[in-house]
Amino acid sequence: MNPRNPLRLQLASERPGTCAWGDVLGAAVFGADPCGADAPPGRPARVPLAEVPMAPLGGCAVIERWRVAGPIQAGSHGMIGYAHSEEFLFGRLHAREDDAGAGRTGLERATERAYREIHATLETTGFPHLLRVWHYIADITLETHGTERYRQFNSARQEALVSCGRSVRGNVPAASALGSSRGPLAIYFLAGRAAPQFIENPRQVSAYHYPAQYGPRAPSFSRAALVRQRGATLLISGTSSILGHRTMHEGDPAAQTRETLANIEALLQEANRLEAGAFALDTLTYKVYVRDPADLPVIRAELDSAVGAAAARVYLRADICRRDLSVEIEAVGERG
């Protein structure tokens, strides 16, 4: 690992016996038991693991590992398991949806409980800055109680942030929210001792300024977060074929992939103004969410054409938060 950059991502399909865990802060595994194992092979008990019931498209289960420089300590707070280095904390939780009550849906109650615990953990451990959050929500576009579940989640997240004294626009973390096949609300996150620089996309309306047609409460996330700690790490949120605030190229997964990559390029341009040309499309690590597996060949072809063969990437079957979106891509860039 490059000693100048204390936070790095390793993302790959792996088989038993191939994992190295010595400097891993936290990990997520996508799919059922990795290649039939009960847990990622060799994982120390101190490494918090987020298990996401989301099928990789081809190959073995995907293991996402966040590696750090320096010693690591582990702990727990409520439903959250975490580990931290001197500079970064990785946490994970699974929040079950209990029965709706008091005018709240089960997902809203689970989201509020999760976010209260996240911020209580950050306060307790001394890592005040939430950098990046991943959310996996069963039946994300299903309508219940008169509204879509993704909109329920956005409302509950914003209310929890307000109640915790946190910002709901501007100074908010990079994030993704995808639809998983089943299970409780699964969340994992990165936090830091130092504040990142949040980045918006000039081609898009900031998500926290979306108009009311997308729900009573706007999504509270930034398009990317630039983390500077002896190097630079760029954490790009889930990105799709959206121009302004409207979906583009409905029904055309190839065109949607190109538009999505144009949005990622716009974020790179903004980041490179701040970090002197540190990032390029072909040096990022990509996680690509595909709604319909039948679209994978055209989505893969567009990505291969744009970023070349060297860029690391994995493909996952997922429901996207808008029914008219075929693909969503998140990415991480590193500069030592």
Image (cartoon, rainbow, N blue to C red):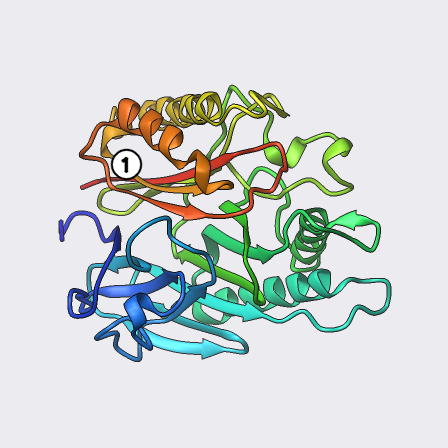
Q: Quadrant of residue 20?
A: bottom left
Instruction: Residue at 54% x, 49% y: name it.
Output: 178
Percent of width and height locating residue 151: 71, 46
Asked whether residue 269 appears in the rendered view, the answer is yes
Percent of width and height locating residue 281: 29, 28
As drawn, is 36 to the left or to the right of 160?
left
Nearer the observer, 52 or 262:
52
As drawn, is 289 to the left or to the right of 331?
right
Residue placed under numbered mark 1 in the picture: 284
Nearer the observer, 238 or 219:
238
Instruction: Residue at 31% x, 25% y: name it.
Output: 272
In the rendered view of the protein, which quadrant contains the C terminus? top left
Instruction: Residue at 65% x, 68% y: name it.
Output: 113
Q: Which amino acid does label 1 sit on?
A: Leu
Q: Residues within 10 Å of mark 1 (few under 14, many from 20)?
A: many
Percent of width and height locating residue 332: 33, 41
As drawn, is 102 to the left or to the right of 260?
right
SS class, disc 1 = loop
Using the image, determine if residue 223 lies above or below residue 62: above
Percent of width and height locating residue 50: 42, 66
Given the current orientation, which residue lies at the most extreme front position?
294
Using the image, determine if residue 171 lies above or below residue 302: below
Nearer the observer, 37 or 221:
37
Q: Quadrant of residue 293?
A: top left
